[in-house]
Amino acid sequence: MRQIPAKFDSNDPRVLDSPYTVYAEVRESGRLARGAAGQWVASHHADVSRLLKDRRLGHQYPAEYHEFSNGTGPANDFLQRIVLDQDPPTHTFWRRIMHHSFSPPLMRRLYGYVAGQVDELMSSALARGHLDVVGDLAFPLPVTVVCELIGIPDVDREAVRPHAVELAKAFALYVRPEERRGAHEAVTWLREYITTLVEERAGRPADDLISNLLAVERETPEVDRATLIDNIVFLFFAGFETTTNLISTTWSALLTNPEQLRLLRERPELAESAVAEMLRYDAPIQATARYVREPVEIDGRTVRAGRILVLLLGAANHDPARFDRPDELDITRDPNPHVSFGGGPHHCLGAALAQVEGRAVVDWLAHAAETPRLNGRIIRRPSVSFRSYRSIPVTLSRGA
């Protein structure tokens, strides 16, 4: 008889704390592991990178799956409308509409603006001599940038913030019952807020994403208002969540690997490869899932249609079969074929924006006259799907 595959328990406290030991155990047990009910789990780089592009796997889940994961509430139909959880041709249609606003060339042209925002936020921190990386930089920077792109006014950004944080829970592989209410309430609040903005822009267009999408709505009968609003909510969330985690990881990783921070300051030209290594070393999004539309064979075992296939991006990024010394931070790593932005048709829409913002932060660290030092304990925000942070306290002082 064949050996029963190992079990990956996403609620294991070790996964929330530091998942890479668990990932190694899962990888070593075989190419396929059991997950929650109806789920299989892939953790090897070769499998994950291939499956991300496999057209037999979809991203559009049955309504029953969302109810199982989130319970009953508005987050369910929200997840069924957004571009992330659609398959072609609907996904292709919406992604084409949104890609213009997040295209790599446009994002690269934003670098000067983003770098200016970093300087402004860090100037305030330097005046105090300290900062909490999460609250003073990693969250306000991407929120400011994405709000500017979408068209959310300055005065509303603090009000939007807590609801955006709660919305992240809806994207977990499985939302714990005690967290479901917050996710559903966040969807309701953000929908109502964006609806108000959309109605204002309908009468007074501006140079922002909302106005651009309203122009598409007027010209395209297939676009309905409810779907448009939900996708604006999703773009707002997607525009900061990955980047907030990337910026936090950058500071955390460099502060706990001071030899790498010294190397960056000695060789600022390593900034681009440093960003790629941060994405690999502690991926902002640790896992993604696909709905199996047609049977898929992995290591002689058939995953049947109707099952969920969980792809552990964080595990793939630490696979020793693909990366030399995978558990070490190495900002000179080249090549670096990480899978942190997914792949195939669902390659992360905000990837270029995250890289621009990550690069601006790394450039600041590489060139700053001040030396950052940890001033307390790094506190994580518990999440299976995201490697997110609650606090990274830092002092800033002149000199080496």
Image: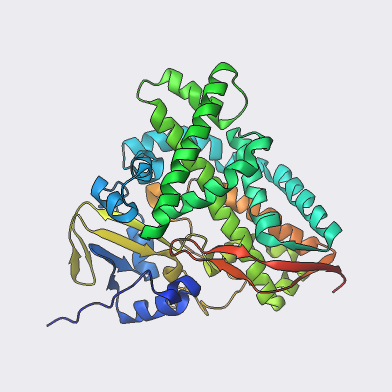
- Picture quarter containing residue 230? top left
Q: Residue lying farthest left? A: 1
Q: Residue at x 34, y 72 (%)?
A: 9
Residue 49, percent from left and from top: 38, 62
* In this view, 121 is above or below 151: below
Does 185 sit left or right of 258 as displayed?
Answer: left
Q: Residue lying farthest right? A: 398
**Closer to the camera in the image, 68 or 79:** 68
Q: Residue at x 60, y 63 (%)?
A: 390
Total number of numbered discs in the rendering = 0
* In this view, 377 is above or below 134: below
**Closer to the camera in the image, 343 or 17:** 17
Q: Quadrant of the N terminus?
A: bottom left
Q: Residue at x 47, y 45 (%)?
A: 186
Q: How is the image coloured?
A: rainbow
* In this view, 187 is above or below 206: below
Does 280 sit left or right of 42 as displayed?
Answer: right
Does 26 sit left or right of 319 as displayed?
Answer: left
Residue 242, percent from left and from top: 54, 54
Q: Is residue 335 visible?
A: no
Q: Is residue 258 visible?
A: yes
Q: Residue at x 56, y 49 (%)?
A: 162
Residue 82, percent from left and from top: 39, 40
Q: Quadrant of the C terminus?
A: bottom right
